[in-house]
Image (tube, rainbow, N blue to C red):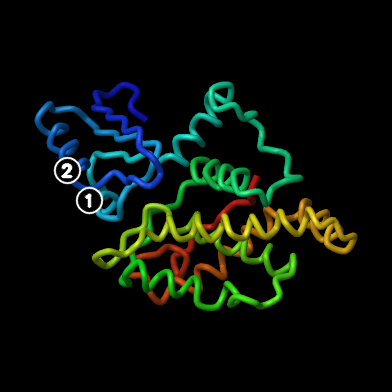
Amino acid sequence: PVLGHRAIIQCKRYAQSTAVGEPTVRELYGLVHAHGVNKGVIITTSRFTAGALEFAQGKPLELIAGPDLLALFNQHMPEVAGVPKEEDDSSRFFEHATFMNQLAEWRVRRPLPYSIRFIGTPNEVWGRLDNWAWPPEGRDRTVGQLLFFLYYFGAAHYLTAGATYRPQEGAAPLEERIVKRLAEISKLLVELELDGEERILAVFEESRQEWRSCLEASMEFVQMDLQKVCSKFWWKPHSTTFGAWS
């Protein structure tokens, strides 16, 4: 929030493939000091690099990425975002756009105590997430399996927001990998639903009633998988209780 304070706000309209880097954030930090304002804010339709997120930590800077910007519109100006203020109907919760919008809204409504700090590189952290959860090519993927993967990687996306890592040159951002995996899972779920088999549709119908609680339960699985490569986290032994997902 910037009400009652002087702030410098920069807006970057970039494609998703173009991230806002650390030099841009450093430049804004210099402007904050030079002009004696209280805060600097960068808003982008895209995302931020790991270096940009790490540099901003502990400074009077706020970085708002594309999903967070959309969530703010949905929360405060739904008529602009084109999405009702109430949560979307859960009948198509597994579609990629719907699922990502839900995650973005939850991130705004239920911010993390602080961002995780990893002792591992992005590749090492991705290895912890990807090594066991996603079956190899050719393995039969049932609706139950795919829904588990959707909840798991959705929880990973939520928990790793704004995380910092041990530097690794040329490593793809973890968020980009997680979003790509979620898109793959959603595509397969949509294909299965379109098949229309009675037993498959029954699983979808049951999941529509409980997917939010399943997503919350997946937090514990992700926490256990990430803990060995974390240097700073809040869930053990100084756990912050997550309230029920609304």
Q: Position of residue 72 (x, y in %)?
A: 49, 33
Give whichever of 169, 39 is nearer the camera.
169
- Percent across and percent down for residue 36 are 13, 28
Q: Earlier in the sequence, mark 2 or mark 1?
A: 2
Q: Residue at x 55, y 62 (%)?
A: 153
Which image quadrant is residue 2 in? top left
Q: Which of the image's four quarters has the N terminus?
A: top left
Asked if residue 131 is positioned above or below residue 83 in the image, the reply reads: below
Disc 2 to disc 1, C-alpha distance? 8 Å
Question: In the rendered image, which residue does mark 2 sit on?
Answer: 26
Looking at the picture, how far across and down is residue 115, in whole percent? 37, 55
Nearest the eye: 99 or 135: 135
The quadrant the C terminus occupies is top right
Quarter of the rendering containing residue 50? bottom left
Helix or strand or loop: what does disc 2 sit on? Answer: helix
What amino acid does circle 1 point to?
Answer: Phe
* Crowding at mark 2 (Cα within 10 Å: few <14, some 14-19, many 20+): some
Q: Nearer the viewer, residue 45 or 61?
A: 45
Mark sitting on residue 55: 1
- Name the amino acid type tagged 2: Arg
Quarter of the image holding residue 61? top left
The local secondary structure at tag 1 comes to helix
